[in-house]
Image (cartoon, helix red, strand yellow):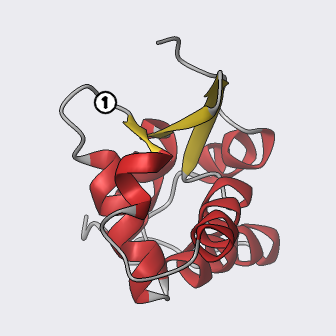
Amino acid sequence: MTDRAVPPDVVSLSADGVALTVAPLAASSATEFAAMFKALGDPVRLRLLSMIASAADGEICVCDLSSAFHLTGPTISHHLRILREAGLVDSDRRGTWVYYRAVPATLILLAGLLHKS
């Protein structure tokens, strides 16, 4: 497993580096954070992220994610794509299967935004 580079939009957000309780967000940062929170606003996506972030090996196969839901494969793929586009998870294809892992920098960034300083 290799660490991926932090997505460019997350890098620009970390330059802001401000908790909500310290200073108002810039408009562009608010737009980027809103996309992340919107991705997490669905219970299926929140569960998926939780399963991915807490995976014992730091990553999990889509085959293991799919079996936990009463949803079709394309629906699970749709939810995972939204998490990936929001910069919350990253993935690698290995043969037939895709393995997902959380993007720690994005999770730390979200936690920092909500942390009361």
Where is residue 48 drawn, in percent x and y? 40, 65
Viewer-closest of 107 and 19: 107
Q: Is residue 113 left or right of residue 31?
A: left
Where is residue 46 drawn, in percent x and y? 39, 74
> Which residue is outermost to the left?
56
Residue drawn at point x = 55 percent, y = 53 percent = 88
Residue 101 in sight from this viewpoint: yes
Where is residue 3 drawn, in percent x and y? 53, 17
Q: Residues within 10 Å of mark 1 (few under 14, many from 20)?
A: few
Where is residue 11 drawn, in percent x and y? 69, 39
Viewer-closest of 38 and 90: 90
Residue drawn at point x = 79 percent, y = 39 percent = 8
Residue drawn at point x = 30 percent, y = 68 percent = 68
Q: Amino acid at mark 1?
A: Gly
Number of dots carrying numbers: 1
Residue drawn at point x = 77 percent, y = 49 percent = 9
In the figure, 5 relative to 49: above or below?
above
Quarter of image, res 82: bottom right
Residue 112 in sight from this viewpoint: no
The residue singled out by tag 1 in the image is 58
> Which residue is outermost to the top?
2
Q: Is residue 43 left or right of residue 87?
A: left
> Which residue is outermost to the bottom?
42
Quarter of image, res 93: top right
Quarter of image, res 30: bottom right
In the figure, 58 relative to 61: above or below?
above
In the figure, 22 relative to 87: above or below?
below
Viewer-closest of 96 and 86: 96
Q: Tell me the quarter of the image containing the C terminus.
A: bottom left
* Mark 1 residue element: loop
